[in-house]
Image: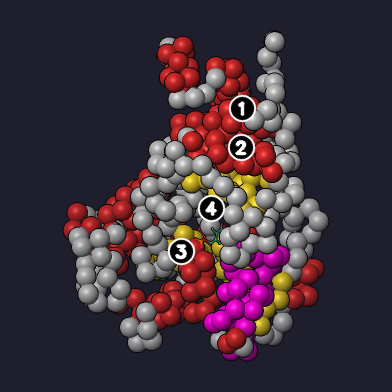
Amino acid sequence: MDKDKLFDLYREMGIRREICEFGAVIEAGLGKRFAAIDRTAEYNQMKVIGAMQKNKVQEGCFHYASGYGYNDWGRDTLEDTYASVFHTESALVRPQITCGTHALALALGANLRPGDELLSASGKPYDTLEEVIGIRPSSGSLAEYGITYSQADLLKDGSFDYEAIERALTDKTKLVAIQRSKGYQTRPSFSVEQIGQVIAFVKEKKPDVICMVDNCYGEFVEMIEPSDVGADLVVGSLIKNPGGGLAPIGGYIAGKKELIDACGYRLTSPGLGKEVGASLGTKQSFYQGLFLAPAVTAGALKGAVFAANIYERLGFPVVPDGTESRHDIIQAVELGTAEGVIAFCRGIQAAAPVDSFVTPEPWAMPGYDSDVIMAAGAFVQGSSIELSADAPIKPPYAVYFQGGLTWQHAKFGILMSLEYMMREGLVKKLPGENR
Ligand SMILES: *Cc1c(COP(=O)(O)O)cnc(C)c1O
């Protein structure tokens, strides 16, 4: 391909030539990584197509369903397809599940009863779950319903503390929750294999306990999912990986039939369960998004690996580092200054297909103890499978970067973040420059 022609276009789009050259050098070194990502995507693509064929997905599955949603068989087929992809007995996949937090709250609320205890085996859970559980007092929390909580903190290196988990398992423990992705922490994310080991350990100590995995950002990153290694419930958001960028809303829970049925009764009503809940016009986007999800996830992963390698070469600490294996699509970059995270986020925003002319500003978001800056120029509001970045304005001034519906867009966003860093004088010189 004519490199000059491409670099001229990048220049018109606002990116100086040295950055393009630097990006090309980094990209050239990532051939093996990218090939491995493509192989995983190929495997997962076959898994999804196989599931769709097995469940006889057909044009009629996409039809609009209204009212109570009785006989919304396209919805039921979608749920069977999810169950086939995750190798589970059943699944609940609905537009009425508003987000990932809601899906997790639903799975917990449906399967815990007063007097039961919830144990987090992966330390502090994702921020929004603190209010679901009642770690931070909140109206309607599990704590208000007499469900207690205990937590086995991770070891210093971020691995599971098996002794602490064993100590925390009591007669009351009904459900053990494991979070795959690091979320907004700097620990490593867990591989599916590591999750399988901790599940096996828990089941050996207490066979009747329910193991639930918060799978957010992890779907299709590996060839297996937590449900392949013993998880009774896997939970996630459709505006992350499995929605493939097309799902406009929604969440999923896949797992054992009786546990999923309980989720249905909790989502709608005792007695009604999964039988009601019209999918309205969402089904085609859910199916087509699931179909695209392996490839979209691969693009986002390439973007994360590229970002890690770019910023690592520039001397910034990155988690995961440029060579580590990946278990989710999140990339953290420690920029070290407020100006750094602001410039980075403004670059990501400037590279967006939507709202590129908007300048993100830090603001006091509810639920956070410092100002937060967010960049998102997304087709679906708040979608984080689309290219997005956010950062709390506090030390160590780390930005969390994820998504990109295509690798090309993710790359453009990262190059633009660097362009903005350079314009602000926060990166002065690129490695390999002979000036
Ligand atoms: C995103 C996320 C959630 C919550 O999902 P929302 O859709 O933002 O409510 C929960 N856990 C993890 C690990 C996440 O990444």
The alpha-carbon separation of the residues under discs 3 and 4 comes to: 13 Å
Of residues 130 and 53, the one nearer the viewer is 130
| Magenta region includes residue 331 | no
Q: Is 392 left or right of 248, judged from the image as shown? A: right
CB within 8 Å, label 1 to label 2: yes
Residue denoted by label 1 = 423
The alpha-carbon separation of the residues under discs 3 and 2 comes to: 29 Å
Judged by depth in the image, the label closer to the viewer, 3 or 2, is: 2
Note whether 191 is above or below 337 in the view shown: below
Residue count near mark 2 (Cα–Cα under 10 Å), binned few <14, some 14–19, many ≥20:
many
Residue 308 showing in the rendered view: yes
Tell me which numbered mark, 1 or 3, is placed earlier along the sequence: 3
Residue denoted by label 4 = 217
Tell me which numbered mark, 3 or 2, is placed earlier along the sequence: 3
Quarter of the picture containing the C terminus is: top right
Residue count near mark 1 (Cα–Cα under 10 Å), binned few <14, some 14–19, many ≥20:
few
Image quarter for ligand 1 equals bottom right
The alpha-carbon separation of the residues under discs 2 and 4 comes to: 25 Å
Please state which amino acid type lies under the numbered disc 1.
Arg
Residue 176 marker: none
Point out residue 300 in the picture as x, y percentages from the top left corner: 50, 41
